[in-house]
Amino acid sequence: MTGDHLYVYGIVEDEELELDVEGVGGAERIYTVTTGGLSAVVSDIDTTDPERTTEAMEAHDRVLKAILEDRTVVPMSFGMAFKDERTLRNVLGGGKRAFRKALDEVEGTVELGVKLVGDADADLRRDPAREEARDRLEPIAVDVVGNDLFSDRLLVNDSYLVDRDDRVAFDEAVGALEQDLDGVVVQYTGPFAPYNFVDIRIGAEQ
């Protein structure tokens, strides 16, 4: 896709980057716009209000996963598009302190998801299951946040921020947890960009 506007996936350290992955709207070129020691990973787009379709959201996540393979990224939420490069550079400059702080906080990490799904007696086991999971996994992680329990059978829905160097130890701890918890299914997902561990809100002049 070509267009006069820029779609932003995330913020990384100052670097020139091009990724061989299809972006939002079928964009074939994923590249960076850099200012003040920060680089926004972007693609061209023909609108500042992209439609929130499943295909578009999957493309957004696909680009973030490609970025995440060998670098730290502060992810932007879906739909962050700017009318031109000048506007984007102004936003990067104005938010430099917040972006830098967020990058420092998640440097060298990935986000991993752990859900524990129980049986019909899930309500009686929610607190013990959460305590067991946290006791085993939290010491290996940098941070943890609890997410919504959107199902009666969902005992635990946690996101962990984990150093890349500790991935093997964390994987093994999740495996051991699954073996030791009777009547509980462990759903282990990731790695993801650390959405749950950064709080960046920026506005696009459209």
Image (cartoon, rainbow, N blue to C red):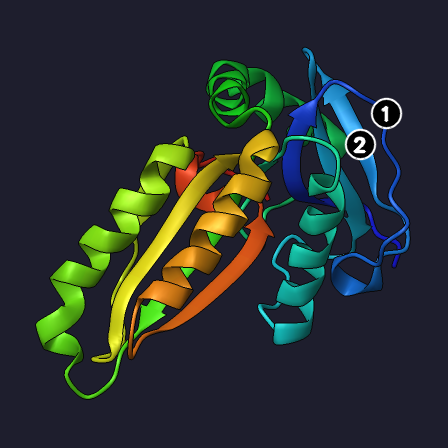
Q: Which residue lies at the image location 85% right of the left edge and 54% below the top edge?
A: 21
- Mark 2: give few (<14), some (14-19) or many (20+) Cα within 10 Å: many
Q: Is residue 169 left or right of residue 129?
A: right
What x and y, as percent, mark residue 205?
A: 57, 38
Q: Is residue 134 left or right of residue 76?
A: left
Q: Which residue lies at the image location 59% right of the left edge and 47% below the top edge?
A: 80
SS at mark 2?
strand
Q: Please determine whether, in this image, residue 2 is positioned above or below residue 74.
A: below
Residue type marked 2: Thr
Kindly tell me whether residue 56 is visible in this rendering: yes
Q: Please determine whether, in this image, residue 154 is positioned above or below residue 104.
A: below
What x and y, as percent, mark residue 145?
A: 31, 45
Cα distance in 3D space between marks 2 and 1: 6 Å
Q: Please determine whether, in this image, residue 94 is positioned above or below residue 147.
A: above
SS at mark 1?
loop
Considering every residue shown, the one lying at the far bottom of the view is 120
Considering every residue shown, the one lying at the far left of the view is 124
Whether pointer 2 and pointer 1 mark residues with C-beta atoms closer than 8 Å, the reply is: yes
What x and y, as percent, mark residue 148?
A: 27, 62
Kindly tell me whether residue 199 is visible in this rendering: no
What x and y, as percent, mark residue 50?
A: 64, 61
Q: Which residue is mark 2?
A: 32
Q: Please determine whether, in this image, residue 88 is positioned above or below residue 177.
A: above
Residue 16: image tag:
1
